[in-house]
Amino acid sequence: MRVRKAVIPAAGLGTRMLPITKSMPKEMLPVVDRPVIHYVVEEAIKAGIDDILIITGKGKRAIEDYFDRSFELEYYLREKGKLGELREIEEIGEMVDIYYVRQKRPLGLGDAILHAEKHVNGEPFAVLLGDDIIVSQKPGIAQLIEVAERKNAPVIGVETVPWDLVGRYGIIAGEEVEDDLYKIRDLVEKPSRKEAPSNVAIIGRYVLPPEIFDVLKDVPPGKGVEVQLTDALKLLLPKSEMFAKRINGRRYDIGSKAGFIIANVELSISREDLRNQVLQHIEKLLREIRYG
Ligand code: G1P
């Protein structure tokens, strides 16, 4: 098995981030000075993916514009001698081959993935959700691809979450067969705390086989009356061994307001050009809070 293609679903309405997402795709929310989806595309490229399909929907045109060349802006920057900025803008336009397909109705993540069937064309493929940014030595999705290729099986990225958050995620149950690697026995989408078989949660990274498309066509709408990828994976389970890999690295849940703010703080501190100013401000804030 060799994974070459990636699918990035970006058709969701982003209701958890309203009101900003009323007129702006959640994938374009800025983390420091680039949109969330930039980090996700970069992760895929670093993992050796050379073909990316983004599933868009209504109101998502800004995503296509972002990854397109912008000759007007490039001309302006060249004229002004802003060569650093020019290089950066040109690089974004040349990152990788990106294709787009539109999901016309918001019927859920499973339905969005189904729109990739033609493009994926019978190959195993990676899925990266824009709700998660993963900062790690080895790209998050590359860690899954390594296992998928070795085991010749689908692999899902997971992380242990606090028990009171299990209802926000797909949850897996399984046996740890190697360090940080589970053989999956069951999957449940957004269970209540009582129903949850564990607190090992699916984060937005998957390596899937093309067989998932046939399952997705049959799976009935689940949680939120949406076609759920987790439900399709559960149906695939009797036919295929499936693994869950605990991803090594720091994950930011951009789909929640607190996670989005934390990502901005931490990623700005990791940037040399911003670190001192941001840290000094945080220290000042903390002093003020402590001493009134
Ligand atoms: C989706 C999946 C869920 C997974 C989550 C990770 O949910 O359905 O299984 O745990 O992404 O971010 P969503 O956040 O789109 O509701």
Image (cartoon, rainbow, N blue to C red):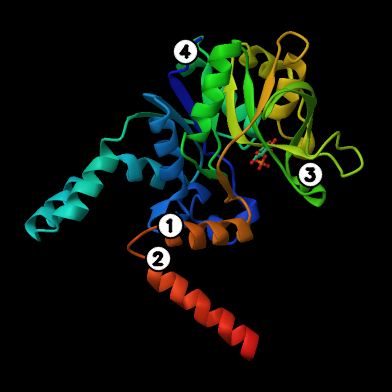
Separation (CA) of disc 1 from disc 4: 33 Å
Q: Secondary structure at mark 2?
A: helix
Asked whether the viewer can see residue 58, the reply is: yes
Quarter of the C terminus within the rendering: bottom right
Left or right, 94 with reference to 164:
left
Residue 211 appears at what percent x and percent y? 62, 11
Inspect the image, locate mark 4, and give the three-letter code of the amino acid beneath it. Answer: Arg
Q: What residue is drawn where x is 76% and y is 17%?
A: 235
Task: Answer whether labels 3 and 4 touch (C-beta < 8 Å).
Answer: no
Task: Answer whether labels 1 and 2 touch (C-beta < 8 Å).
Answer: yes
Inspect the image, locate mark 2, and give the three-letter code of the amino acid beneath it. Answer: Arg
Inspect the image, locate mark 3, and give the three-letter code of the amino acid beneath it. Answer: Val
Residue 248 appears at what percent x and percent y? 57, 37
Q: Which residue is mark 3?
A: 166
Q: Secondary structure at mark 1?
A: loop
Q: Which residue is mark 4?
A: 2
Q: Which residue is mark 2?
A: 275
Nearer-N-terminus badge (3/1): 3
In the figure, 147 relative to 37: above or below? Answer: above
Numbered disc in front, either 2 or 4: 2
Separation (CA) of disc 2 from disc 3: 33 Å
Nearer-N-terminus badge (1/2): 1
Q: Which residue is mark 1?
A: 270
Q: Secondary structure at mark 4?
A: loop
Numbered disc in front, either 1 or 4: 1
Nearer-N-terminus badge (2/3): 3
